[in-house]
Amino acid sequence: MADPVVASHLSLVLKAPPTISSPSHSLPQQHSKPMASSLNSAASLRLFASSSSSSSSAAARLSLRSTSLSFSSSLKSLAFSPLSRHKRGSAVSMSSTGVFSSVASPKCAASDPDQLKSAREDIKELLKSKFCHPILVRLGWHDAGTYNKNIEEWPRRGGANGSLRFEVELKHAANAGLVNALNLIQHIKDKYSGVTYADLFQLASATAIEEAGGPKIPMKYGRVDVSGPNECPEEGRLPAAGPPSPADHLREVFYRMGLNDKEIVALSGAHTLGRSRPERSGWGKPETKYTKDGPGAPGGQSWTVQWLKFDNSYFKDIKAKRDEDLLVLPTDAVLFEDPSFKVYAEKYAEDQETFFKDYAEAHAKLSNLGAKFNPPEGIVLDDGPR
């Protein structure tokens, strides 16, 4: 577990862009510069398989493989997953070098419900082994949190459209370290090509909340991916951790998304998960008694004692102000200082059931911001009550 859940309810002020290493072998790119994967699990070349017949698909694969081998002597092997023949899926594949592609799923590519369910099970297993709940929450929030309600045109309005997979957006200061989250789930994307990145990011975020003991999020799927890095939002749409006027800043950013004071405070409660690392955000201690032994990579400063358990401890601990080893950012403290915010913060500190109800509604709303759905009404996974 290496990253905090987003500070200021979506992100911390992150001082430096994520480190980009130079792969030992790289494939030619026709779009933006490739993003190196620190975990060697990324896509490096876009390959389409549009034929519907098995014989033509096989011929297309052989032709593409032959062409690719002659085109780059550094490419040792190339093969399609059987799932790559789904027209609705991503056209991204992965090379042995672990380099992300700057190309994307076709537009209007809805996700396959069965693959979504299977991907969710794989995410659960990932959470059990990597303790990566906070960074997956942050990944989903940062993809959705660029939404501007004043812009009608998709994808210029931002929001949950999978644009965060591109290097140009990953390099935004507020997204420092999120390449690690992308690396963690890239193998799931490769396995389930019928799931868009936009859906996968939100599926991972909601699943992380639920698996940490939080409420069931009323999610829907079918988000369409943007087609290229030129459709990424400009930098500066995500909130800061320590602005001069925290309450005004939070309202400016979240009102732009169409969220209200109750939703701002409820979403802030996700800070019950995760840690802040000063080398990435400029905030927090290098380690505390609660983080020095992990789980996951040790270090950082958490908002709560049990920082992998989703509950209402965040509000209780801010109100108590008893533990110097627990992080309180200016945008956290203001929840008990601003008269309107304080009404909800006090309520959530006393009533976890109300917090869970309001949080689930706010999280679902955030996850849909700016998204274009195919089908338009979205896809609800029929998996029964939790």
Image (cartoon, rainbow, N blue to C red):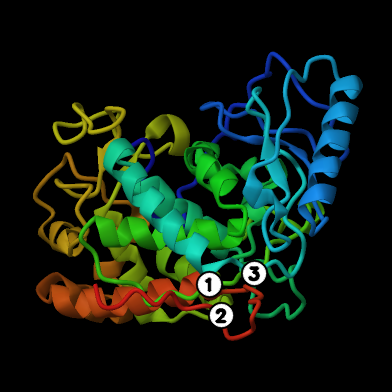
Question: What's the CA distance linking mark 3 and mark 2?
Answer: 9 Å
| Viewer-proximal residue among 80 and 206 | 80
Tell me the residue that label 2 is attached to.
Answer: 378
User: The residue tagged with tag 1: helix, strand or loop?
Assistant: loop
| Quarter assignment of residue 222 | bottom right
Decide: few, some or many residues near mark 1? Use Cα within 10 Å; few <14, some 14-19, many ≥20: many
From this viewpoint, is residue 26 visible? yes
Q: Secondary structure at mark 2?
A: loop
Residue 240, x across and y down, in percent: 49, 54
Q: Is residue 174 left or right of residue 78?
A: left
The amino acid sitting under disc 2 is: Gly
Where residue 105 sits in the image (x, y, percent)?
72, 56
Q: Secondary structure at mark 3?
A: loop
The residue beneath circle 3 is 110
Residue 135 image position (x, y, % from top left): 41, 46
Identify which amino acid the numbered label 1 is placed on. Tyr
Which residue has dot 1 on it?
A: 221
Q: What is the residue that sits farthest to the front in this orientation?
A: 55
- Residue 6 in view: no
